[in-house]
Image: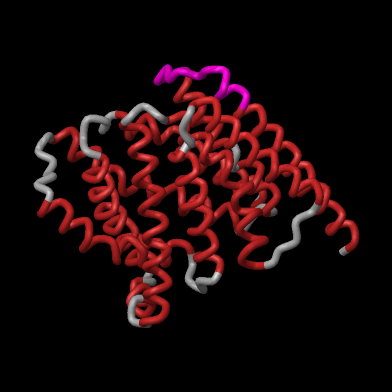
Amino acid sequence: MTETTRGVAAMIAACTVWGLSSLYYKMLADVPPITVLAHRTIWSAVFFALVLMVQGRFRVLMQALGQGRQVAHIGLAALMISTNWFFFIYSISVGHATQASLGYYIFPLVAVLLGFVFFKERLGLWQQIAVALAALAVTTLTIGLGVAPYISLVLAFSFGFYGVLKKSLSLGPVVSVTAEVTLLVPIAIVVLSIGGLHVTDPAHLALMIGSGPLTGLPLILFSYASRRIPMSTVGLLQYLNPTLQFLVATLVFQEPFGIWYAIAFAMIWTALAIYSTATLRAASRKKASA
């Protein structure tokens, strides 16, 4: 098996875990989302710390947390990822997993927009059309439902801003995520203590503990894949995640999927097709001219 094949397999595995994770969190639907988030934070920190110890890189984490300016940067990233995690868990708990899938479909287009705003990355004509079509989809859904799909927007923009912050961090993905959840652990402990949100059911507690590896393993697979396959391939394979989320929401959870959702999703899928085609053509031209 070649390195590229291994990378593709790792990326598919990571996106499959992410895409099916709603099934896991649905088993915790009767637990307050803030409790699930607090436990996910704590057990993710434990899992990542163990990984760094095995890799012999725990000292790198300590060095990262010893630099004041960098800690503030990591803290902002931690705020973004915890917001993303909370609203994903919340969407499953309240029966809006379809909105969550829409959010992760929108994310690549939000990332393009944020790249333009923060890094002055040029937007080609077709990319502009894709972003405009995504905005039109959200507007159409807002008008149709009478309320903005705020879960979708929060998920897309929180993950987008998380990416902006991560872009200017020199730490590797495992070290940086470990640092982020480490900063969040004291807050998680306070939330559980003050809120009286302890989990006493053994099955629920086992699921909470399992959320640590569930969070960590796909990230490690993603990191492995990103170093072995082109970013254009990474981008295309990532659509597997929201697609699986969408199928679980509509077929397994049987959430309602009315005409307004159908119109909005059709627009988003069209926008992604335009964006992906433009990206692949640009990558092909760059490769040909190299």
Q: Give residue 173's position: percent from left, percent from top.
A: 47, 62
Of 247 and 45, nearer the camera is 247
Residue 209 in view of the camera: no
Q: Considering the image in quadrants, where does the N terminus appear?
A: top right
Is 189 a magenta residue? Answer: no
Q: Residue at x 64, y 40 (%)?
A: 134
Above or below: residue 256 compared with residue 7: above
Work out whether residue 113 or residue 177 is closer to the camera in this orientation and state it: 113
Depicted 71 relative to depicted 36: above or below: below
Residue farthest right in this picture: 289
Kindly identify the residue that appears in the image at 45 percent across and 40 percent down. Answer: 150
Q: Is residue 139 above or below residue 86?
A: above
- In which quadrant of the rendered image does the C terminus lie? bottom right
Which one is in front, 241 or 267?
267
- Quarter-of-image position of residue 182: bottom left
Q: Is residue 263 shown above or below 169?
A: above
Residue at left offset 60%, top offset 29%? 264
Q: Is residue 262 magenta?
A: yes
The residue shown at (37%, 71%) is: 56
Judged left or right of residue 122, residue 231 is left
Q: Position of residue 177 (x, y in %)?
A: 40, 61
Please provide the residue range marked out in magenta. 251-263
Question: In the drawing, does residue 178 fall left or right of residue 221?
Answer: left
